[in-house]
Image (tube, helix red, strand yellow):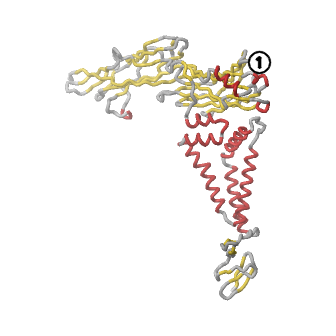
Amino acid sequence: MSWPCNYCGYTNSDRVNVCANCGTKRGANQATREPQKTKTAKGSEKKEVKPADYLNFAAWIKAIGVTAFLAVIIVTNPLISSLNDSIMSFANFLNPDNTLTDAMWIVWVIAAICLLALFFYTLRYNSIWLGIVLIFVFTLVTVVLPMVYENNPTLAAALCTITNPQNVAYCQAGLSGNVPPAVKVGPTGVANVYFNTATYGMTLFGREDEYGNGIDINLDIYAMPIRVSNPSDTRIVKNFYVVSAQLYNSSASMKSSAKKPLGDPLTPDRCTQVSKCTLGPGDEMIINLRGSGVLADSTSAGAEVRLEYSYDYVGEGQNDFIFAANWTDLSRAKETSEGAKKFEGPVDVTVYFVPDSIVAPDASLYNGNVYVQVYLSKDEDVAHAQIRSPINITMFYGYTAGHDVFAAAKTCMASWGDDLSISTTYSTGAKTDSVEFGGTTLSVKQQLSCTYPYSLTPEDVNYPKTVKFVVRVDYSYIGKLTKRGILIQRTITPVD
């Protein structure tokens, strides 16, 4: 019988097939060549390397198929843009002169080399398994892992730090939620609001019949006082008003979902949305929340008041950025620096930099980028704030006030994702960049990250140059309070 050998041609044998050219033995039912085993110097066996068959039509189809399929996935995947950003960050980290301005070609060259290698591997071995594995891994990385990141901020922060070494603070704060430390100057509470129940407001009055069955609750004679004060000696609280105040039925054993409003909302006797109040330094006022009407209610034995209020305030934060020619000068300058501070108010504004300073002993380091990070955070989860546009970043120059090292165009990105624009105003020894956006709600934390290109002269680092950054954020704070334990006292009314 005869059998085809893909590498040696044809031969015949009664029982055992033998390739006439290479001597490889075959079983009668075999159709492909078995690698010939040869003896090494120590007597061990090793397999002969199978030569490539570049004329195999099936191998060409497989190579073209898996390579083209993976190429389409790569080209159409948004991972390419984020990969480009990571490569740019790493390249600039290694190249502080920033002479590398575009790294997108690096991404495409790497992708092309990898695809070409996959093509020749598949053609050489006539196997699509490597391509299938790569397609699976790439899909896992680009589809599954992002969903894991959303539910695992610690993992996301770690991977972000590895791929974005020049902006570590952005990764650690923006993803893991850790805001850099800053000294708090002034109180958190600038409009202290609390229920003033020392004399009244803890009892509702209603009626019941002679059999002890409830009839109704009289809200016309009910009032709950709240006390509002401004503890600051210098700052003003503007536009304070009661957003809403509502009675709910309540008891120690009642679930929140079972609580229902009792009657119409309570009405404040002052500080309403159409007539807002201003609290000067040290001011204090009483606001009475009054009920109205008679509510048919036969079951409620207790109640609670839920209050929501709002006021306008300005949050501030500051920090010093230092340029120096050597580490000794930098250390001395940091000793006199005020460092990171966040000032009074319920919303903390923390200013931070990556890197936190620049040591430039020669002209090769006179140009680069400083990443200015602005973190907005608060402690209370029951409140939130409406952040208003713009956020103003003011730079005050020190010893060489006439030279603006941050004169180049700046760009900003925000965790809330709006399109940002920057306008600049100048004053003596200072410059303010106003970052404008559509507005955002601060529920727990938000972050603004701005790229400030710098350009130094020898005079800027002969003596350490300190640039003070002061960031002002306007916001409307919305706070909530709940007063429980209000009793409903009913008087007996005979039934005719």
Q: Is residue 192 left or right of residue 18?
A: left
| Residue at horizontal 78 percent and vertical 37 percent from the top | 99
| Residue at horizontal 74 percent and vertical 57 percent from the top | 116
User: From the image, which quarter does the C terminus lie in?
Assistant: top left
Q: Nearer the viewer, residue 440 or 298?
A: 440
Q: Position of residue 383 (x, y in %)?
A: 49, 27
Q: Is residue 24 left or right of residue 268?
A: right
Q: Position of residue 297 (x, y in %)?
A: 31, 27
| Residue at horizontal 53 percent and vertical 17 percent from the top | 239
Q: Amino acid at mark 1?
A: Gly
Picture quarter containing residue 164? top right
The residue indicated by pointer 1 is 402
Residue 70 visible in the snapshot: yes
Picture quarter containing residue 50? bottom right
Q: How many marks?
A: 1
Q: Is residue 128 above or below residue 295?
A: below
Residue 312 visible in the snapshot: no
Q: Is residue 235 above or below residue 32?
A: above
User: From the image, which quarter does the N terminus lie in?
Assistant: bottom right
Q: Is residue 123 above or below residue 343?
A: below
Few, some or many C-alpha atoms within 10 Å of disc 1 (few <14, some 14-19, many ≥20)? few
| Residue at horizontal 59 percent and vertical 41 percent from the top | 158
Outermost residue toward the front in this view: 42
Q: Position of residue 140 (x, y in %)?
A: 60, 51
Q: Is residue 278 left or right of residue 221?
A: right
Picture quarter containing residue 114? bottom right
